[in-house]
Image (spheres, helix red, strand yellow):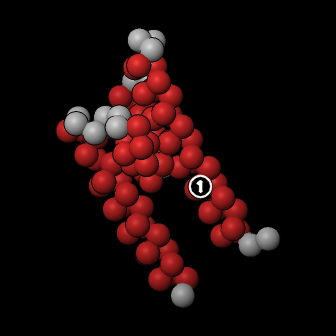
Amino acid sequence: MHIVFYILIIYLILNLVSLLMYRSDKNKAINDQYRTSESTLLLAALIGPFGAYAGMRRYHHKTRKLKFKLVFVFMALHIIIAALVIFEFM
């Protein structure tokens, strides 16, 4: 298989992990359990911003916190980097 395929699979997994982290933290908040730190959630958003955004929207979690607006910046960075990589190899 081509290396790009493996990179895409890894990227999808990272975004899925990010989504699941947001879901888990939301469930912990509802059940009054020990929570995932905001810095950990932001790191997950940096690595998998599309999963983090989906988690924020789907579970209505961290949508009012100002620092979580960075998720949009992270998404934009990932799109720009992907575009640069694609155009570099074309």
Q: Nearer the viewer, residue 80 or 26?
A: 26
> Residue at horizontal 35%, vertical 34%?
61
> Residue at horizontal 39%, vertical 48%?
53
Rendering coords of residue 58 (x, y %): 42, 43
> Residue at horizontal 45%, vertical 14%?
31
The relative height of residue 39 versus residue 56 in the rendered view (above or below) is above
Q: Quadrant of the N terminus?
A: bottom right
- Camera sees residue 60: yes
Rendering coords of residue 77 (x, y %): 36, 61
The three-letter code of the residue at mark 1 reads Leu
Q: Nearer the viewer, residue 29 or 86?
A: 29
Q: Nearer the viewer, residue 22 or 47?
A: 22
- Camera sees residue 45: no
Q: Quadrant of the C terminus?
A: bottom right
Q: Which residue is mark 1?
A: 12
The relative height of residue 15 versus residue 7 in the rendered view (above or below) is above
Relative to 7, 47 lies left or right: left
Residue lying furthest right: 1
Mark 1: few/some/many CA within 10 Å (<14, 14-19, 20+): some
